């Protein structure tokens, strides 16, 4: 409770006192996530708001932008939420993590259909999260296929409606239907799409003159924040490893080179995506969707309605933006993959037993969930060969199991001795959780050999 | 701490008793639970000796009362006598720590009721004045299940006041030989030294109250007791007091085993001695040979142990 209050105070301080150029929401989110582990759940739940602030450059303290900010955040919340949760779950090594990132990438595409598909994938991802959480808590998940399918269909329809209807629509779709800029003679018309039927093709359209919602220095701050976050996570993992728990495991020069490559790729992608390297492209150049740029001073005055300057309607992002988006998605996947492969060996028992510590780590719900999940794996693995009777206690079952499979008796007894204090005593720590998982692995392997 | 206390008391009792590990454990469970125990077995199986050696090992005050039909309540609780111009209270044998009541079913219901008031409330009332009994107060009552002539069987409501009922049983061949060897000379109970104290026993009782019981295990306890009520052979099932007793005994069993949380194994271990004497079976099934232990065993097999659901 104290941690949550501290996190809330820190977030409020960052939000209210720091200037908007310092992106206080993002910094507060990173600080809360790193400094207050017990408050991470709350931080993840609030992540959409921070990420919306980050991505759209919204300053909620500016009264005249509040309304627009609200619409933008409503449209962006599912995607941002998905991103934040997926990162958290990737840390735990969930194999279906790619679904979430796929959903993010699809939802970023300026199409109602793609948005709906993305949200559908996000829904699937949420179901995976529920299953994972239930497994950690040791409870069974009973799927209701019809209800789930109905929920998914409803979510997709709702997402589609949100993408097309009124002020709820995806901002960049609204952009496509609004006059944004005027043509400028002599400028390359890479992205100009003449959309007024029958309009003359000349003079060529001017490049868009938008007002970037994220300026260059803000973009750099963003990149620096991301890099700092990544470095902090690495240090955290190394520190955990140093304390004898599961943590980082360096894999030498090639690992570091790969890590540097993916970080660099991510940085370049972000710069493209934010319109820093290619002005007028990406979110950074396209967010001025409600503002009409003034006509260029060199443009000739129209002599008649038929000679009026062509209104350029652009679908943002353009070619560079698409490239940046693709690179960004790939970079994110690479970063996560690198995080898993290069650095971290999460959830595995240490190679050697850790030295006994005088002060044990505080019991956590996640550690207890890991022990219970390990015991469930044991019960499931043994279900066909020697199912547990409903009236049997874990200790009685371990005894019967040991009598039937003498070579696995020690593992069954060891896992049961770890499970009992968790299930009935409300205690567990990371070390015991890792040992329980190791026992469960041994039992699964042993039973598989017995079967063969 | 409690496990250490249990081990040293048990080892001390073993200087006298042979092959009575489980009854010793259950008696200490009853004491740590602030309950009372009823020893029911045939004569000569060591009921009195177990109670004496336990009291001596614990360093507690010990009194023994042989219940007979002419025993009056005042013989148990004490009387006011006229001395030097005023009434003076002379406390009865109930004012002690461990009270051994031999043949409890041979006294009249009036005397039994006086004892049961002391057991339930930890106090006695004489001539309108109430006096507290110094804790710990632990009653070990015995009764002979075979000689029922001239006895006043305890009604179910009074049996319910005992936390548990134990049977010692006959020793095995080797154990009986060991008894012969041990009692060849002077009786070892005379030389038994205390390894505990009343204050230590009170601390043990206080720690037992702090043992954790998972909510799912509380439901498990309730389900077992309810299963005894719903059994077809039972005319009167275990009461809610039995539910409380089962939980408290399981907490003490966990503490004596060195844990500060209860396991389902603890519940199972104490279920029989806690529940059996509280069940009243229908006459026709008694004739068929069904006994309370069968009902308790059926209840334990009918209720699922809370562990992990596999879906």
Image (tube, coloured by chain):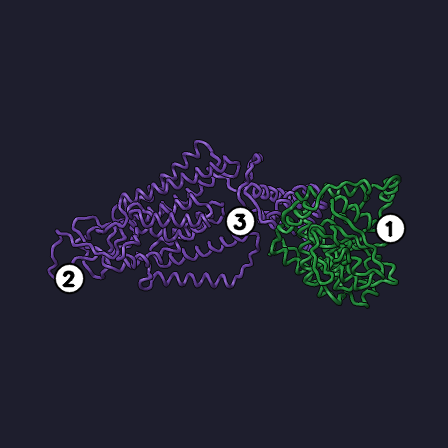
Q: How far apart are marks 1 and 3 (CA)?
A: 54 Å
Please say if the residues under marks 1 and 2 sit with CB atoms less than 8 Å apart. Answer: no
> Dot 1, how many residues are within 10 Å of its Cα: few (below 14), some (14-19), or many (20+)?
few
Indicate the colour of chain A.
purple
Q: Which residue corresponds to mark 2?
A: A306
Residue B129, x across and y down, in percent: 70, 60
Q: Give left or right: position of B249 versus B172.
A: left
Residue B70 in sight from this viewpoint: yes
Q: Which residue corresponds to mark 3?
A: A365
Is label 1 on the same chain as label 2?
A: no
Q: Which residue corresponds to mark 1?
A: B44
Q: Is mark 3 on a helix, strand or loop?
A: helix
Q: Looking at the image, which residue is at 25% across and 51% down?
A: A191
The quadrant of the picture occupied by the C terminus of chain A is: top right
Is label 1 on the same chain as label 3?
A: no
> Dot 3, how many residues are within 10 Å of its Cα: few (below 14), some (14-19), or many (20+)?
some
Q: Distance between the residues labelled 2 and 3?
A: 70 Å
Q: The green chain is which one?
A: B
């Amino acid at each position: 409770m104290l941690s949550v209050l501290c996190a809330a105070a820190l977030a409020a301080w960052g939000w209210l006192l720091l200037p908007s150029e310092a992106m206080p929401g993002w910094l507060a989110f990173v600080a809360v996530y790193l400094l207050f582990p017990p408050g991470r759940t709350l931080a993840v739940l609030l992540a959409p708001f921070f990420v919306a602030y980050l991505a759209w450059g919204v300053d909620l303290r500016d009264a005249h932008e509040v309304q627009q900010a609200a619409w933008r955040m409503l449209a962006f919340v599912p995607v941002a939420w998905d991103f934040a949760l997926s990162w958290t779950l990737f840390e735990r090594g969930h194999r279906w993590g790619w679904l979430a990132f796929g959903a993010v990438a699809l939802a970023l595409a300026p199409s109602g259909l793609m948005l709906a598909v993305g949200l559908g994938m996000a829904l699937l991802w949420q179901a995976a999260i529920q299953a994972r959480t239930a497994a950690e808590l040791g409870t069974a998940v009973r799927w209701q296929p019809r209800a789930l399918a109905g929920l998914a269909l409803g979510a997709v329809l709702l997402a589609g409606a949100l993408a097309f209807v009124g002020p709820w629509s995806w901002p960049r779709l609204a952009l496509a239907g609004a006059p944004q800029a005027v043509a400028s003679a002599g400028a390359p018309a890479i992205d100009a799409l003449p959309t007024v039927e029958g309009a003359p093709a000349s003079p060529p359209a001017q490049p868009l003159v938008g007002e970037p919602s994220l300026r260059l220095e803000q973009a750099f701050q963003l990149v620096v924040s991301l890099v700092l976050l990544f470095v902090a996570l690495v240090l955290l993992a190394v520190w955990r490893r140093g304390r004898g728990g599961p943590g980082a495991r360096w894999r030498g020069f090639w690992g570091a080179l790969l890590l540097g490559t993916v970080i660099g790729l991510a940085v370049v992608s972000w710069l493209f995506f934010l319109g820093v390297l290619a002005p007028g492209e990406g979110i950074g150049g396209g967010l001025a969707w409600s503002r009409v740029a003034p006509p260029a001073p060199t443009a000739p005055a129209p002599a008649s309605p038929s000679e009026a300057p062509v209104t350029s309607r652009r679908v943002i992002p353009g070619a560079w933006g698409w490239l940046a988006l693709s690179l960004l998605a790939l970079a994110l996947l690479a970063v996560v993959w690198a995080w898993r492969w290069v650095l971290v060996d999460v959830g595995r028992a240490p190679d050697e037993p850790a030295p006994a510590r005088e002060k044990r780590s505080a019991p956590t719900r996640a550690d207890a969930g890991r022990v219970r999940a390990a015991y469930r794996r044991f019960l499931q693995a043994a279900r066909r060969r020697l199912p547990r009777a409903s009236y049997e206690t874990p200790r009685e079952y371990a005894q019967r199991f040991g009598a039937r499979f003498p070579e696995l008796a020690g593992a069954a007894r060891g896992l049961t001795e770890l499970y009992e204090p968790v299930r009935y005593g409300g205690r567990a720590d990371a070390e015991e959780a890792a040992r329980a998982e190791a026992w469960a692995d041994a039992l699964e392997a042993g039973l598989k050999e017995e079967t063969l | 701490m409690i496990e250490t206390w249990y081990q040293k008391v048990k080892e001390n009792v073993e200087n006298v008793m042979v092959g009575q590990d489980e009854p010793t454990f259950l008696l200490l469970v009853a004491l740590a639970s602030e309950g009372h125990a009823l020893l029911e077995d045939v004569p000569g199986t060591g009921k009195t000796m177990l109670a004496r050696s336990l009291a001596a090992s614990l360093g507690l005050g010990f009194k023994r009362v042989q219940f007979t039909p002419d025993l009056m309540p005042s013989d148990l609780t004490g009387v006011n006598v006229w001395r030097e111009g005023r009434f003076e209270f002379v406390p009865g044998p109930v004012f002690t720590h461990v009270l051994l009541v031999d043949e409890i079913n041979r006294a009249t219901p009036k005397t039994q009721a006086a004892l049961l008031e002391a057991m339930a409330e930890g106090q006695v009332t004489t001539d309108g004045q109430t006096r507290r009994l110094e804790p710990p107060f632990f009653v070990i009552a015995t009764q002979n299940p075979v000689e029922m002539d001239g006895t006043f069987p305890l009604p179910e409501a009074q049996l319910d006041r005992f936390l548990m009922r134990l049977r010692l049983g006959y020793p095995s061949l080797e154990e009986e030989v060991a008894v012969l060897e041990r009692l060849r000379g002077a009786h070892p109970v005379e030389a038994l030294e205390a390894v505990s104290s009343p204050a230590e026993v009170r601390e043990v009782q206080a720690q037992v109250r702090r043992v954790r019981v998972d909510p799912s295990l509380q439901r498990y306890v309730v389900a077992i007791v309810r299963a005894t009520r719903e059994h077809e052979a039972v005319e009167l099932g275990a009461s809610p007091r039995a539910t409380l007793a089962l939980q408290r005994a399981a907490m003490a069993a966990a503490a004596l085993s060195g844990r500060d949380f209860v396991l389902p194994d603890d519940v199972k271990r104490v279920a029989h001695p806690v529940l059996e004497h509280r069940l009243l079976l229908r006459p026709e099934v008694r004739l068929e040979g069904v006994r309370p232990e069968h009902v308790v065993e059926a209840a334990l097999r009918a209720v699922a142990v809370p562990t992990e659901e596999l879906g």
